[in-house]
Image: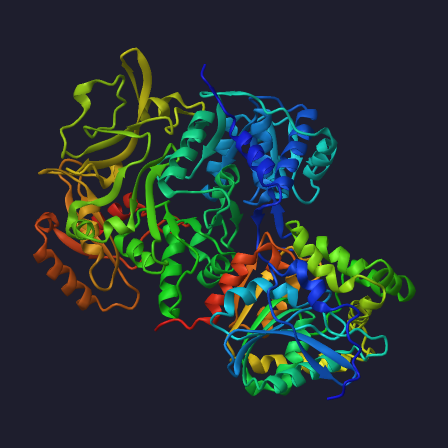
């Protein structure tokens, strides 16, 4: 198997060059600043300590530690051993969480006292755990991370485990908005390719300061030689972040880059406009996690100093980045095309990514063939391949089979990953999203995808958001646009605006009616992903 | 003015020769009762100026990068407090906060300055705000760098050690413990040999270290300290400067003026712009010289619209 540099080698090399540079800083905390030299030494000490306790290459290790210098150290310590960190988004709810843990069969658990408590309360899910390490306060029988680190402190540099491209580097469980969470298997090769793509797309350079509104980006920062500053954003409640505090941390730290979800940036934009505030050092904002409306992208662009840009990568945990769009690109006619119902433009393919569109369907595709590929301009499910695309789901062959299409071409074997999104490529090679595959409407006149129409109506005055749902059984679904008005908006005004907009849009004739909903059912986490099935049921009760 | 002041032992011009490439400023002297105050005065002769006040154990040398960058546009005035730098050093001088404040008043009056931007570092914060309290109408803007102008119960152990009556005074004066230690403990990147030489230049012998030692002893930690009353009066006046544009620049790796002091500034001056430097310590104008100068320039240049 082809060898690849373990990503933790990068952290070590960076620390050797700039040992005294700040690596992680949490404003307002006493411990303040951690340098790259300290970070690297801590990684080695923890790696030695864990290896002494018997942790071995390949051991899956649950990590429940909030984003911090500690999390960076732990993750890299595991990389150095060749053990596999398993990161589970705690925002998914207890039942899903326990199911994920049980499915993973981890050998070790490293986590805050709360996770240790869970290990005792829900023993069933944790039966495979042989080694428990407690982070922070001592609790319930786990070894203390502090002691593990102390044990390894005098042992010097840990011999970093050599890795092959296809060796599993980490398992990531994210809360999928549809279906049970699946463990995405990331290999060393995937991480390497992701780092390269992000570096190239956003011109990331060592020595830059990242205000990590998406705190897990700290793991990339450390590897790229960038300094992470943590703004006060709760990892599982980003929509509640205090925009003034986020702005302050960015300004005070002189951050040049920031990565965060639309929920955070929407708040920051509204606050900055109200207060007449701008950014003075920030030159790149990257927004991901949910669709980003042009208004947000362009609005933030105006807050940046000259030459700054706002980017939104398209992708998923399984493949990121697939493509990327900059506000500067969107500024012209592109924005108008989004707002008149062509879909959501997500830009051109990212470095190393190859795109194909295939017919929409829910069944597995056993084998790739050239005739699956749709003609340019046609709408279909987005498929991607390339070194940054993850190969499988952990212990889930059914899900893997559903999402991957194996190919054999000129002696090369591999797979295409199905994104579950429907899109279209334009003449200039830009990708346009039309909606999730599972959100499609099967009407009597064929398939209808929700995003183009929603974009076109979302810009109406007093409209907060919209969702296109089908009333009736698949094959005879009647499209209705459910509208959530801005709080306090007058119903007549909204109706008038919607009808006026409908007159301007050709596709609007397919909408059979408008329905008003006070507050969409959405995910708690981002306050962005709409629970469509629930909304469809709600609409069906109304229309009947 | 009297001519009582003892002239520096050596000709300052000669001792400055090796520093000239970085500190190419003319030396000016103001004779004060019992002392001679050395100061730098660069840039256009106007009654509006940027007044730089150093702390302990530094001198106007600390401001050399800022002065060189700003003086083409702004008048830059930077005195050495009595007992420091090239100002006179005498055993019997009252090295107290109120005296240093009075000296600054004399300098400002002598130069006929009417509108000032105060740039304050370390103990210069208390001296500068002591001046501001008495002449608020002359203070247009404020810049604070790792400083305080309020009493604090926190004194770092290493400074406390210097205050142990006999050991402290001897260590500071015999061994130059304070100034020498500061050349490595206050910076996060090693100083160039020229910069190190510059910082230590005025403090080469026992007699010359009187000011450094006196400054350390003048930190009013207890309520009965002679400067405590002055410092409390200064602190009480701070909120009245909330309406002035203020900039706080802070090296986060300062074991003396820790981020707790920064938080106190935020509380006192909630509208101040704050810029922190993660890679810098107490001598942030050395660790982050470009960034500090850039921030000063940005702050001093009025923005359009």
Left or right for A133, reference A6? right
Q: Residue at x 15, y 52 (%)?
A: A340
Is residue B282 visible to us here?
Answer: no
Left or right for A374, reference A120? left
Q: Position of residue A412 (x, y in %)?
A: 31, 14
Q: Residue at x 62, y 79 (%)?
A: B238
Residues A380 and B115: in front is: B115
Left or right for B29, reference A412? right
Q: Position of residue B5 (x, y in %)?
A: 78, 80
> In the figure, A206 relative to A457: above or below?
above
- Number of marks in the image? 0
Left or right for A214, reference A309? right
Residues B198 and B257: in front is: B198
> In the figure, A118 relative to B279: above or below?
above
Could you say which quadrant of the image residue B125 lies in?
A: bottom right
Residues A467 and A410: in front is: A410
Q: Residue at x 39, y 35 (%)?
A: A317
Residues A37 and B91: in front is: B91
Q: Position of residue B175 (x, y in %)?
A: 85, 58
The way the protein has been coloured in the rendering is rainbow
Is residue A344 visible to us here?
Answer: yes
> In the figure, A61 relative to B161: above or below?
above
Residue at the extreme top of the image, as rendered: A411
Where the N terminus of chain A falls, by quadrant? top left
Q: Position of residue B286 (x, y in %)?
A: 61, 57
């Amino acid at each position: 198997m082809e060898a690849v540099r373990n990503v933790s080698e990068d952290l070590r090399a960076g620390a050797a060059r700039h040992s005294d540079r700040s690596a992680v800083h949490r404003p307002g905390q006493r411990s303040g600043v951690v340098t790259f030299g300290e970070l690297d030494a801590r990684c080695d000490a923890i790696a030695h300590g864990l290896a002494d306790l018997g942790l071995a290459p390949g051991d899956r290790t649950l990590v429940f530690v909030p984003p911090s210098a500690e999390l960076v150290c732990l993750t890299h310590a595991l990389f150095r051993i060749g053990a596999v960190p398993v990161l589970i988004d705690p925002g998914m709810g207890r039942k899903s969480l326990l199911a994920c843990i049980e499915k993973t069969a981890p050998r070790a658990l490293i986590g805050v006292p709360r996770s240790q408590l869970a290990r005792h309360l829900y023993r069933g899910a944790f039966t495979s755990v042989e080694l428990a390490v407690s982070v922070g306060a001592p609790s319930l029988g786990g070894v203390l991370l502090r002691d593990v680190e102390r044990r390894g402190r005098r042992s010097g540099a840990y011999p970093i485990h050599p890795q092959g491209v296809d060796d599993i580097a980490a398992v990531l469980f994210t809360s999928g908005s549809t279906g049970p969470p699946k463990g995405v298997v990331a290999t060393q090769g995937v991480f390497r390719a992701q780092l390269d793509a992000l570096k190239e797309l956003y011109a990331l350079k060592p020595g830059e300061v990242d205000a990590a509104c998406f705190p897990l980006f700290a793991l990339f920062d450390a590897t790229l030689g960038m300094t992470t500053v943590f703004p006060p954003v709760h990892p599982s409640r980003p929509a509640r972040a205090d925009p003034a505090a986020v702005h302050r941390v960015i300004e005070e730290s002189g951050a040049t880059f920031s990565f965060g979800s639309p929920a955070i940036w929407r708040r920051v934009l509204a606050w900055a406009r109200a207060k007449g505030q701008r950014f003075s050092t920030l030159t790149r904002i990257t927004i991901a996690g949910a669709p980003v409306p042009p208004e947000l992208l362009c609005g933030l662009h105006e807050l940046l100093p000259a030459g700054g840009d706002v980017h939104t990568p398209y992708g998923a945990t399984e493949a990121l980045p697939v493509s990327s769009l900059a506000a500067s690109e969107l500024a012209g006619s592109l924005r108008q095309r989004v707002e008149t119902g062509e879909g959501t433009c997500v830009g051109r393919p990212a470095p190393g990514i190859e795109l194909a569109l295939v017919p929409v369907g829910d069944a597995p595709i056993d084998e790739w063939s050239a005739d699956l590929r749709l003609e340019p301009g046609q709408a279909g499910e987005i498929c991607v391949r390339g070194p940054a695309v993850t190969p499988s789901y952990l212990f889930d062959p059914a899900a893997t089979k559903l999402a991957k299409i194996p190919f054999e071409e000129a002696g090369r074997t591999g797979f295409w990953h199905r994104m579950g999104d429907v899109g279209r490529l334009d003449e200039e090679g830009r990708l346009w999203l039309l909606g999730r595959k599972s959100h499609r409407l099967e009407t009597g006149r064929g398939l209808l995808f929700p995003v183009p129409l929603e974009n076109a109506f979302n810009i109406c005055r007093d409209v907060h958001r919209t969702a296109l749902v089908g009333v009736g059984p698949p094959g005879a679904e009647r499209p209705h646009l459910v509208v959530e008005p801005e709080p306090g908006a007058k119903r007549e005004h909204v109706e008038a605006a919607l009808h006026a907009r409908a007159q301007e849009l050709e596709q609007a004739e397919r909408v059979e009616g408008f329905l008003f909903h006070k507050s969409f059912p959405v995910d708690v986490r981002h306050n962005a992903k709409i629970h469509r099935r629930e909304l469809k049921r709600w609409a069906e009760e109304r229309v009947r | 003015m009297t001519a009582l002041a003892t002239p520096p032992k050596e000709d300052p011009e000669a001792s400055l020769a090796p520093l000239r490439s970085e500190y190419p400023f003319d030396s000016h002297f103001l004779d004060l009762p019992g002392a001679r105050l050395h100061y730098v005065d660069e840039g256009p002769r106007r009654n509006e100026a940027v007044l730089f006040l150093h702390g302990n154990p530094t001198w106007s040398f600390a401001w050399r990068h800022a002065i060189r960058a700003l003086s083409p546009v702004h008048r830059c005035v930077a005195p050495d407090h009595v007992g420091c730098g090239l100002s006179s050093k005498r055993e019997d001088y009252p090295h107290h906060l109120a005296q240093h404040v009075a000296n600054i008043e004399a300098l400002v009056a002598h130069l006929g300055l009417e509108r000032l931007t105060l740039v304050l570092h370390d103990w210069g914060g208390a001296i500068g705000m002591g001046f501001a309290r008495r002449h608020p109408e002359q203070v247009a803007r404020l810049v604070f760098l790792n400083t305080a102008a309020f009493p604090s119960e926190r004194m770092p152990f290493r400074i406390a050690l210097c205050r142990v009556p006999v050991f402290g005074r001897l260590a500071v004066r015999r061994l130059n413990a304070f100034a020498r230690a500061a050349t490595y403990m206050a910076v996060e990147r090693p100083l160039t040999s020229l910069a190190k030489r510059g910082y230590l230049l005025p403090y080469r012998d026992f007699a010359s270290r009187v000011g450094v030692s006196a400054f350390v002893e003048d930190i009013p930690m207890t309520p009965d300290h002679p400067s405590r009353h002055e410092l409390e009066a200064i602190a009480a006046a701070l909120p009245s400067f909330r309406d002035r544009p203020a900039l706080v620049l802070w090296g986060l790796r300062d074991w003396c003026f820790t981020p707790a002091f920064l938080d106190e500034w935020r509380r006192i001056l909630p509208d101040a712009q704050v810029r922190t430097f993660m890679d810098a310590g107490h001598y942030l104008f050395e660790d982050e010289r470009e960034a500090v100068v850039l921030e000063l320039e940005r702050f001093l240049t009025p923005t359009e619209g």
